[in-house]
Image (tube, helix red, strand yellow):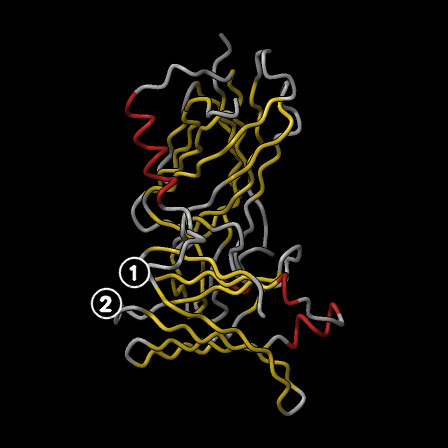
Amino acid sequence: MKSKHFEFLFHPIKLGKSLALLSIFTIYFATQSSLANTEITTDVVSIKYIHGWKDNNGDILGAIQFKLSPGWKTYWRNPGPFGIKPTFDWTSSQNIRKVELSWPTPKIFQQYDVKVIGYQNVLTIPIKIIKMFPLQHAVLNIKLEFGVCADICLLKTAKISTPLQFQTPKENFDLITTALKEVPSKTTGKVFFSSKCSIDINDDDLSIEYLVHLFKVPKSKPEMIIEYAFSDDYIDNLTVKLEGKKLSVKTSLQNIYSYHKVIERNRLTALLILEDSGFVITGCD
């Protein structure tokens, strides 16, 4: 049986407090590499593939797990304006037609007064693997590119190669099912009873506002991430107001409109982060 392999390239990037993360990703690269079987562990991060099981449709469920050293963070799929967007290239896999990643609800951190969207400690990303030929064996080959940050930032690449197995230990099953529960939910009926989205033009600015009526007063201030689908554009500078059970989130869409010359309401998606859980609001009617 072929072993799993992980290959890392490390690119340290120095930070200056005054420039914050503006300079993180444009300075220089110093390269190192290493190889290990099954799992690689450094003083910053370890990464491994967790074997899962077949679902009722014959698709394979597994996970990729990152374990970060204290003080280090890695990024969500949409990392914010100064983050490193992670990429996963599985095109060299054998007998695999499609790979789908389900990202857990991220946290929003402030690093040098810049918003960073990501994770700390442990990140487990459930993945669904769809074979080309269901009855034949398959080998998963994934090349990952991702960033980790503390006082410095490292841009890393990793290569995972493993035949797919289905004899799932209970530990693997528990890890993957727990991670699936942390994926943002489209079921919002137990969290808020109504939400309204509106787009307005004021003083040559195009703005969007979400009004959400929660069932109960949250223990901590909610946060929201607004995205424009099929686009790398980032919608930032949100104004979040919470008055009792009423939540208002407002921001400008001018940068999106200036680039696309149109706003398609069905491409707008809001991720409401409420007490570490995520809830998806699709479209803007």
Is the residue marked by circle 2 packed among few (<14), some (14-19), or many (20+) residues within 10 Å?
few
Cβ atoms under marks 2 and 1 closer than 8 Å:
yes
* Three-letter code for the amino acid on which mark 1 is drawn: Glu
The mark that comes first in sequence, 2 or 1, is 2
* 7 displayed left or right of 193: right
Instruction: Using the image, determine if residue 185 lies above or below residue 210.
Output: above
> Which residue is at the front of the view, 259 or 12?
259
* 136 displayed left or right of 69: right
Q: How many marks?
A: 2
Give the percent coordinates (x, y) of residue 258: 72, 74
Residue 219: mark in rendering: 2
Toward the bottom, the furthest residue is 203
* Three-letter code for the amino acid on which mark 2 is drawn: Lys
How far is disc 2 from disc 1 in space, using C-alphas? 7 Å
> Which residue is at the front of the view, 208 or 211?
211
Give the percent coordinates (x, y) of residue 168: 36, 19
Residue name at image x 47 percent, y 50 percent: 75
Residue name at image x 48 percent, y 14 percent: 3
To which residue does mark 1 refer?
275
Give the percent coordinates (x, y) of residue 44: 37, 40
Task: Tell me the element at label 1.
Answer: loop
Work out which quarter of the rendered image holds the C terminus and state it.
Answer: bottom right
